[in-house]
Image (cartoon, rainbow, N blue to C red):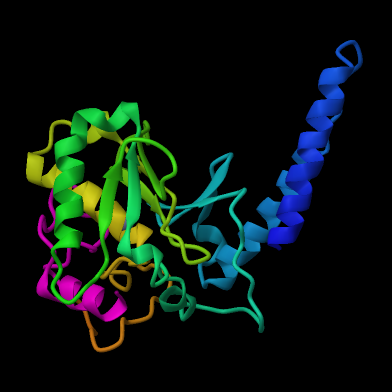
Amino acid sequence: MKKLIQTIAVAAMMTLVIVSCKKNQETITDEPQATVKNADKVLQYIKDLGFPAESIVDNGSEFVVEEDILFPKDMVVPFVTEGPKTEQYYTGSIVNSTKKLNIRVFIDPSMTSMTSEINSGIAQWNAVPNSTLRFNVVTAAPYDILIKDENLGSGTCGQGQFPSGGSAGALIKINKSYIAGNSFAQRARTICHEFGHCISFRHTNWSARGESTATNVPGVTGTDALSLMNGGQCNSGATVLSQKDKDATAALY
Ligand SMILES: [Zn+2]
């Protein structure tokens, strides 16, 4: 798969070179076709993860599932060796043992006004006992997660990606103007929650919300009203990681 992507990337670069050498001719590129093909694979991957087709929203450059989970159409789809994987894939899709030690977060200029909230959210994950997971803010590339402002309309406070290929989910979008009127603790909660998706957490209350079946983290079962990873609770949910949130983090990381 990686090889195929590399091949496509090289082909696209060569096309660019060729096009730039023939300014008077019509631009021809095979890139759009390649993107469409990858999008089909991403769509299948989302279905294989157990999300029903009707829960998947095509948002142009990405698919959105359960309102705040993003799958970019150009993502590298993890190689599945045997048949479709359902929810079990989530626990297999965590940040790997090397990368979890230093997950680099780059704050887009559009989000620097909420740097304090971002630092607060990060500090909660970094302080979990018996976990070696660490987020670190960096001021230049390379980085693992980009956090930026985007108008997500009314009702959605933020969106995050799941990990893939051993890397943390690469993008967090925060509906900055929408949450601007919330308290500091609630703004930080939204950001902390999206970071949780980037390290593979599903919504703790997935069942009550009618979301697709999620797998329990080993040893940490059941519902949890105090979980910061409960979904659909922007500006009303927990502002600190619950004991179970911490136990789950320690179990995975
Ligand atoms: Zn969420």
The boundaries of the magenta stretch are 224-253
Q: Is residue 151 left or right of residue 133?
A: right
> Residue at image x 30%, y 36%?
175
> Residue at image x 39%, y 63%?
99
Residue 15 x/y as whole percent = 83, 32
Residue toward you, 140 or 27: 140
Q: Is residue 50 left or right of residue 26?
A: left
Please say whether residue 230 is one of the residues in the magenta stretch.
yes
> Residue at image x 27%, y 50%?
136
The image quarter containing residue 198 is: bottom left
Above or below residue 130? Residue 151 is above
Q: Is residue 50 left or right of residue 180?
A: right
The image quarter containing residue 25 is: top right
Residue 150 x/y as whole percent = 37, 32
Q: Ligand 1, what quadrant?
A: bottom left
Residue 232 visible, this orientation: no
